[in-house]
Image (spheres, rainbow, N blue to C red):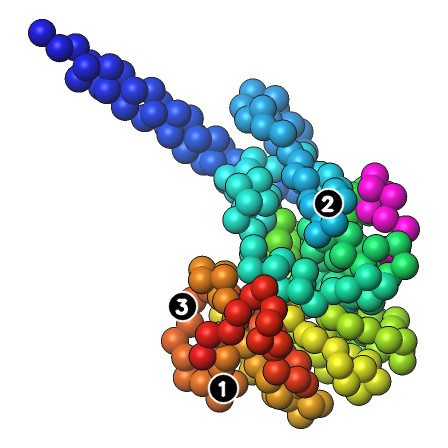
Amino acid sequence: MSFGGGGSMTRKRDEGAALSGQSVGRALTRLTDLTAEVIGSVHGTVAAAIRGVLRLGRDRSVVVVGPDGTTATLRLHEDRFSGMDTIGSQLLSGSYEPTTARVLEALIARGATVVDVGANIGYFTVLSALLTGPTGRVVAFEPEPRNHTVLTGNVAANDLRQVTVIQAACADRVGQHELSINSSETGWHRLAPAGETARGKRVLVDLTTVDTVIGEAPVDVIKIDVEGHEGSVVAGMLSTVASNPGVTVILEYSPAQARLAGLDPLTPVTLLREAGLRHTYVVREDKAVLERIDPAALGSREVKTGRSINLMLRALPWPADTAVPVSS
């Protein structure tokens, strides 16, 4: 008589219990976030209690590796369950925008200058710093206070002296503006649209422009990820682009987020094309390729609500001999 089936049933029960535990953890984390929106300052105490009981016990760090084998350790948010922090979860699993990372590896040479707008906790900032080396320069903008704290900690812990961190949001003007804080996702904070009725937590942050900070200095790559406000960032960096005709811009294209902000999602693409960056590609994370696209098709292309993609724009075609191929 075989007892193999009983072992299989036991494994299934164990797996089911593990999944139930993860579901409970996610539900309680969401409850913590909702509590933050309702009772504000009590959130810290409630969250600490829940974390103390349900610690996942998972190392909250990842190792970033440069092309020459140099490494840096990136610490993630300590106060987030990996199931609710999408960026942290994807970094831990190695699935966070791998094709975008490969594109940057192909673009950024030793001594290059990179601008990272919406740096979050610094994954692409740190990767860019390893690629540029000590003779290069990386300027990282991150306005959200907790992200900024983790970002500066990662830069300091890895002694990345080529990185300058600026606690400000980039836009088309200099001043101040309210940042709407997403209570569940560390990467979904956004500038509050003008006239929007206040809901949830908000903080007042500084605004600046890429032109103000960079001026006419040489720049090789600009990466932008600001939850729908990419058009405003591009409007504030046109002088920088004009001074650097060889620059490559990688930006998040998120129609749903842009519309939520009351903005036209095609604005950044239109402005960059008018500035001479006429070759446009979709970074296909699912296929590890770049896909040529007519920007006019972006407006008619069906993009599911909440979905975003990275676009790359440059004045010259993407080189055929690069490690990331082009698919028409």
Count of number-bearing discs: 3
Residue 237 at x, y percent in the picture: 78, 79
Residue 294 has which mark? 1
The residue at the point 62 percent across, 64 percent down is 103
Residue lying farthest to the left in this orientation: 1
The residue at the point 86 percent across, 48 percent down is 160
Q: Specify the quadrant of the image occupied by residue 97.
A: bottom right
Of the image marks 1 and 3, the number of the one nearer the N terminus: 1
Q: Specify the quadrant of the image occupied by residue 36.
A: top right
Write the start and end of the magenta stretch as one range: 155-166
* Disc 1 to disc 3, C-alpha distance: 19 Å
Mark closer to the observer (3, 2): 2
Q: Nearer the viewer, residue 51 or 156?
A: 156
Mark closer to the observer (1, 3): 1
Label 1 Cα neighbours within 10 Å, binned few <14 / some 14-19 / many ≥20: few
Residue type of the residue flagged with mark 3: Lys
Residue type of the residue flagged with mark 2: Gly
Q: Which residue is mark 3?
A: 304
